[in-house]
Image: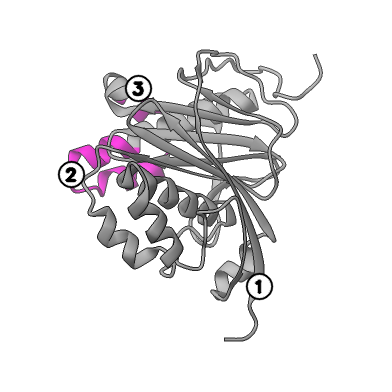
Amino acid sequence: MSGGKNLIIRCHGPLVADLRHDRAARLYGREVHAWFTTLAKERSALARYETLLDMEERARADRFRFDEDRERFIIGHGLLRLHLGHYLGIAPTSVRMLRGKHGKPYLQDHDLHFNLSDTKDALVIAVARTEQLGVDVETMDRNVDHLSVGEHYFSSAEVEGMRTAMEPKRRFLELWTRKEAVLKASGVGIMEDLRILNVNEHEQEMTIHHPEFIALAGNAYDVSTWSVGERHIVSIALPAPPDQVHFFATAPAVTPHLPRSGDGN
């Protein structure tokens, strides 16, 4: 197939996330903030999070067939509004989000970029300035036939690396979250042929042919992978390396009229 596009992916890790507890965290320069929490920890605040949602989000929540999926959506989107309100210095209910062509939410006329990912028992919200980013979280507690899924979606080198790893399932989740983070950073969100995204080596150059991916993807992505505790794996992708990535374990405090992070004084 002709008309492809060259793409470079640089991978780092797995690293070990050091979860901070800073409710007044401010975002400077090319930093990334990643807020991690478990659903069990947040479920008692479900009613509060639901009050933060707008009408469209509440309608989407009501369409879930299973209570656990509905609760995960409400917690994730309520927390997202808390975090965005914190960085923007406005009330969570005042946050106005739009959606891109493939559903990725964004803020209009702001330099703040964000991405939300959830899994069976946890979620993570990543925030950065000036750079589009993608984040993906997975749990070791998820039941998945990692060898079968890996053989379907991974390159032969990735499958071999998974098979020979000390923890094949963990290696599968590291590779899977890297691929998902790159797709989310580009705004595509989902793509059938994941074999072309090689993420098993430190630096790899590949040619992509998917029309939407060609249109939206950058020329390169920097992808870092962390272990969060013993059970969770998080990958974050950006077009260029961030200055620092800070992980946080506590939701931020929101104060209306708080100066935006990165502003003076």
What type is the residue that disc 1 sits on?
Answer: Lys
Q: Secondary structure at mark 2?
A: loop
Q: Residues within 10 Å of mark 3 (few under 14, many from 20)?
A: some
Whether residue 203 is situated above or below residue 255 in the rendered picture? below
Which quarter of the figure is the C terminus placed in? top right
Which residue position holds label 2? 66
Any mark on residue 150, and which? none
Which is nearer the eye, 191 or 56? 191
The residue type indicated by label 3 comes to: Arg
Whole-percent x, y for residue 168 in the image: 32, 47
> Looking at the image, can residue 234 be seen?
yes
Element marked by disc 3: helix
Residue sitting at 75 percent across and 25 percent down? 262
Mark in the foreground, 2 or 3: 2
Up/down of 19 relative to 244, above or below: above
Task: Give the residue at mark 3.
Answer: 48
Boundaries of the magenta span: 46-73
Measuring from the top left, give residue 165's x and y in whole percent: 37, 47
Does the magenta segment cover residue 52?
yes
Name the kind of residue labelled 2 in the image: Phe
Q: In the rendered structure, does residue 251 fall within the stretch colored magenta?
A: no
Q: Nearer the viewer, mark 1 or mark 3?
A: 1
Residue pushed farthest left? Answer: 66
Residue on which the image places disc 1: 5
* Image quarter in which the N terminus is found: bottom right
